[in-house]
Structure formats: structure tokens, C-alpha cells
Amino acid sequence: MPPRWPRKPDRQDPDYRKLDDRMTFAVHVAAFAAVNSGLWFLRQIEVISWSGVPWITGIWVGMLLGHGIYIFAIADYSSPTPNQPS
């Protein structure tokens, strides 16, 4: 069952933005696991003999690490300050 959000979803809400970003990261991890396990399985049973599979996995791991570092260490989920005219 998906998580329920008690308020109207709004990207301006820092709690919603944090939850949404973490759910997006979870989808990214799931896609990585599904695609790469399939590629490595096909390579193992020699359906594909392509030597680029390790490169795809390595590059994707790098992107996944970058995404995770951004979500868990860099992203600022504090309340946005309203724009005030000068």
C-alpha cells in the first residue's frame, strides 16, 4: 500500500518534497536492480556477448551514488522563504 499524504501534495512543502525525492530514489534503485540483473543474467547464459555490460553497470552505479548523496546529504528541505520585493 502506498504511503498516504495527509495534506494536499505540493512541491513547496518541504516534507512532501523530501518524501517525493526519496520515493524517486527508491524507483531509481529498483530500476537499476531490475535492468542490471537482467543484463548480467543474459550475459552469463551467453544470450548476449556484449562487453559493455560492466560499463553500463559502473556508470549507473556512479549516477546512483550521486543521486543518493544529493538526496541524503546535499538537498535542503527547509521551508522556502517567500520572495519579498526589494
Image (cartoon, helix red, strand yellow):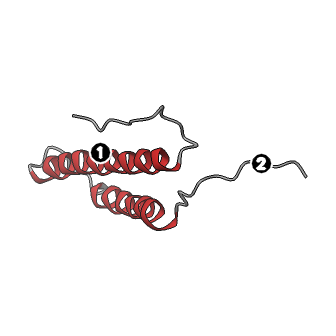
- For label 2, the SS is loop
Camera-nearest label, 1 or 2:
2
Judged from this view, the residue extending furthest toward the front is: 6
How would you rate the neighbour count of disc 1 (Cα within 10 Å): few for under 14, some for 14-19, many for 20 or more?
few
Q: Nearer the viewer, residue 83 or 20?
A: 83
Q: Nearer the viewer, residue 44 or 75?
A: 75
Asked if residue 18 lies left or right of residue 83, the reply is: left
Amino acid type shown at disc 2: Asn
Q: Position of residue 30 (x, y in %)?
A: 26, 47
In the image, residue 81 sits, relative to residue 61, either above or below, namely above
Measuring 42% from the left and 44% from the top, which residue is drawn there?
A: 20
Real-space CA distance between mark 1 and mark 2, rounded to the nearest whole angstrom: 38 Å
In the rendered image, which residue does mark 2 sit on?
Answer: 83
Q: Residue furthest right?
A: 86
* Label 2: few (<14), some (14–19) or many (≥20) C-alpha neighbours in 10 Å: few
Q: Mark 1 and mark 2 in contact? Answer it, CB < 8 Å.
A: no
- Looking at the image, residue 38 sits to the left or right of residue 23; the answer is left
Q: Quadrant of residue 7?
A: top left
Q: Is residue 32 left or right of residue 74?
A: left
Please state the horizontal and vertical placement of residue 5, each as a whole percent of the image.
38, 36
Tell me the residue at 56%/58% (across/down): 78
Sequence-wise first label, 1 or 2: 1
Q: Quadrant of the N terminus?
A: top left
**Which amino acid type corresponds to the residue marked 1 in the rendered image?**
Ala
Query: Circle 1 is placed at which residue position?
Result: 31
Residue at left offset 46%, top offset 44%:
16
Q: Where is residue 17 drawn, in percent x and y?
A: 49, 47
Q: Position of residue 54 (x, y in %)?
A: 28, 61
